[in-house]
Image (cartoon, helix red, strand yellow):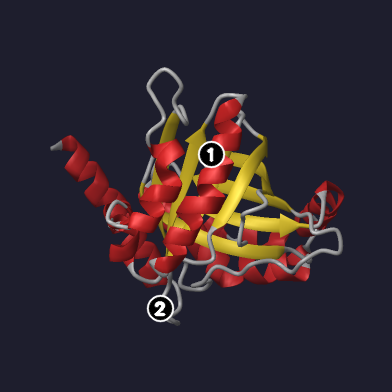
Amino acid sequence: MERRAFLGSSLAASAMAFAEAPAGPAREFYELRRYQLQTGPQTKLTQSYFADALIPALNRLGIRPVGAFQLEIGPQTPAYYLLLPSTKLETLVTAELLLAKDDKFMKAAEPFWNAPATSPAFQRVESSLLAAFEGWPKLTPPPKTPSGKRVFQLRTYESPSSQDHVRKVEMFHHGEFEIFKSAGFDQVFYGDTLIGPRVPNLTYMLSFADLSELNTRWDAFRNSPAWNKLKSSPRYGFEEIVSNVTNLILSPLPCSQV
């Protein structure tokens, strides 16, 4: 009963956040998966599973582009992240059931799906369901770099209350998107967590050519007069509306479509 009430309050907070945002195109939903692995055969097996079985099958379901990333800086490495976008919520929540009926997928996935308990393919998989911000309704893949390499930053903002969460989402719609753009960021997606750990929270992804550019862009953001004005306004500066920030640095796997 307590869990139902908790989920209900979280979803209500998300609905309030969307109500505060300006109307726009239909937004996407995202499943964000984390695959916790052990160093050794698991990493190679999981990459092969992504490239040869899972991502092609998800594409056949209309889930595209699929982001596939390796955790470079953050806790508990090695870990891989998958970002699954869809405009149809039902597609995301039924994907695993549909994959099990896809003979082509099942054949390609056999080494991963049927790995023995004595040599498992992964340690654990964690998943969150997010809804895109109305002001940033679709995933935006970053431009290609001459080297073909990029750095991705995945950031999660937890808030101490539903009110603070709603106001933090509102901040993005009332100026923060534009400040990121002015500072030269490549903005990939913004999502409000509907189901997942540590709610209420939001998660977003940025991309850079390298770590040097990441630091340069953030310096420009922090020194922006528009940012300092926005964060000090009475509506957003009356208390700390973000209680914890998780900051991960990722690199795309060869099979990533983002």
Q: Which residue is mark 2?
A: 26
**One can see residue 232 in this view:** no
Other residues around mark 2 within 10 Å, as few (<14) / some (14–19) / many (≥20):
few
Looking at the image, tell me whether mark 2 or mark 1 is earlier in sequence order. Answer: 2
233 is higher (above) or lower (below) than 127: below
Horizontal and vertical percent position of residue 51: 56, 52
* 152 on left or right of 62: right
Quadrant location, the N terminus: top left
* 152 on left or right of 37: right
Horizontal and vertical percent position of residue 227: 70, 61
Residue at screen point 82% across, 47% down: 211
172 is higher (above) or lower (below) than 150: below
At label 2, the amino acid type is Ala
Horizontal and vertical percent position of residue 187: 65, 64
Q: Marks 2 and 1: which is nearer the front?
A: 1
Kindly indicate the quadrant of the structure image that contains residue 109: top left
Quadrant location, the C terminus: bottom right
